[in-house]
Amino acid sequence: METHVFFLQLLSILLGARLMAELAIRVGVPAVIGELMAGVILGPSLLGWLEPTAVLRLLAEIGIILLLFEVGLDTDVKRLANTGVKSVLVALGGFFVPFLLGFALAFYGFDLPLLVALFIGGTLTATSIGITVRVLTDLHRQHSHEGQVVLGAAVLDDVLGVVLLALLYEFSIGGGVSIVNASKVLAFVGAFFLLAPVMAKLISLLVSRFDAVSELPGLIPTTIVSLVLFFAWLAHAVGAPELLGGFAAGLALSRRFFFPFGLALRSNEQFSERIETQMQPIIQLFTPIFFVMVGLSLNLREIDWSSVFIWSFALSLLLIAVVGKFAGVLLIRERRSLRLIIGTAMVPRGEVGLIFAELGRVSGIFNNEVYAAMVIVIAATTIFSPLAMKWLYERLDDAPPASSGSRY
């Protein structure tokens, strides 16, 4: 590819993603849907101006690693302790039930191969903590009781999802499911999560010291991006997806990170805030490229939209994707209205679901029809949840207060 052509393509991606994200926000849907649609419009599905290339895929890979870094950075492990058993039950029910139902539907109902069915179940386990946090914040409910339960559950969901992603990644490159390989990956991932964050925290303290005496601007973004890329390489070296390294680095640099076995290292709150502030422009520059690339990779013209398989498969998965997230909610003792809100807040798959789906496509696990069905489900859950939460909260605010002895 000639340099000037690449510049024009990158310009189209960045501006297209921004314009469509702004439009999406104005019509009341998450920005990620707009960025996904930008890829559909610019790609082979509609205008045909762009197609996925090796260079654009590399930029998208950087974007996905930085996106998982941001997810880790926003993760508050202590939130799990604060919300206790309720968050754990919501997370475990909302993780295992969609996984098992999605796998069973694909494997037994539609007779898909074992690895494909595992990837489909894995994709349905996701919960987009970014979209959930954004919706709760917009509604000024992030500090409410149910908001804390949701955020705690979403944190645990993310950790379980990343571990599952590492397993599925190993199965995809190994050509099939292997108990030996799964045990090896779990051991490596466990060691990685124990040791890598400790290393990252110590490095961050060193960077903080140097930043205090450095006379050149830009030390924090340069060193933090370097740290994220190093951890991505390290994750690959132990047999896990590169994006796991980004998540571990973000987790270690979050404001409230506690080492294993109860050991804690004091966090510099001001330094953590500076990391978030100075990394935001870089993250916001690269992550839209990933979502646009997802849209570019989806050629809607090659899909037989009259196919009974696509619609029956997508609608069946959509039902599981919504209902499955309410499984854990049924196990907790709350008012019915709050349980509805908590379950609905766990529904959006967003960027996390797209990460699973894209890994399945890139690995050759998903064909075009299965991939299209997964994207339909992810988009539908991502749009549904914010609108439903807003409606439920409006009804909750208008409802008369419950009596002290009522569960509802």
Image (cartoon, helix red, strand yellow):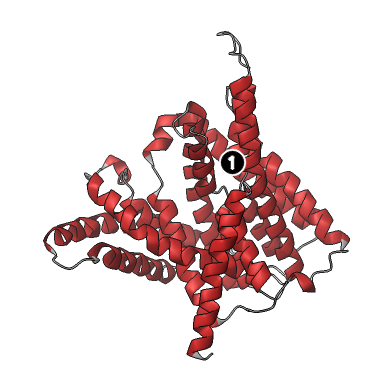
Q: Is 393 situated left or right of 199 in this image?
A: right
User: Quarter holding the N terminus?
Assistant: bottom right
**x 75%, y 69%: residue:** 300
Give the labeled residue for mark 1.
346
Q: How far across and down, in percent of the image, does residue 72 sit?
A: 41, 52
Q: Is residue 16 left or right of residue 120?
A: left
Question: What residue do we see at 58% from left, 70% from top?
Answer: 293
- How many discs mark residues in the rendered view? 1
The residue drawn where x is 38% and y is 61% is 281
Q: Quadrant of the C terminus?
A: top right
Q: Which residue is painted at 76% across and 66% down in the image?
A: 369
> Which one is nearer the viewer's eye here, 50 or 338?
50
- Within 10 angstroms of label 1, few (less than 14), some, or many (20 or more) residues? many
- Residue 330 appearing in the image: no
Percent of width and height locating residue 361: 64, 69
196 above or below 405?
A: below
Q: Is residue 7 shown left or right of residue 232?
A: right
The residue at the far left in this view is: 213
Is residue 50 positioned above or below 4 on the image?
A: above
Q: Amino acid at mark 1?
A: Met
Secondary structure beneath dot 1 equals loop
Say if residue 181 shows up in the picture. Answer: yes
- Residue 174 lies, with reference to residue 261, above or below; the image says below
Residue 2 % position (x, y): 51, 91
Residue 346, image x, y percentages? 59, 41
Front residue of 290/243: it is 290
> From what the image shows, is residue 309 above or below residue 230?
above
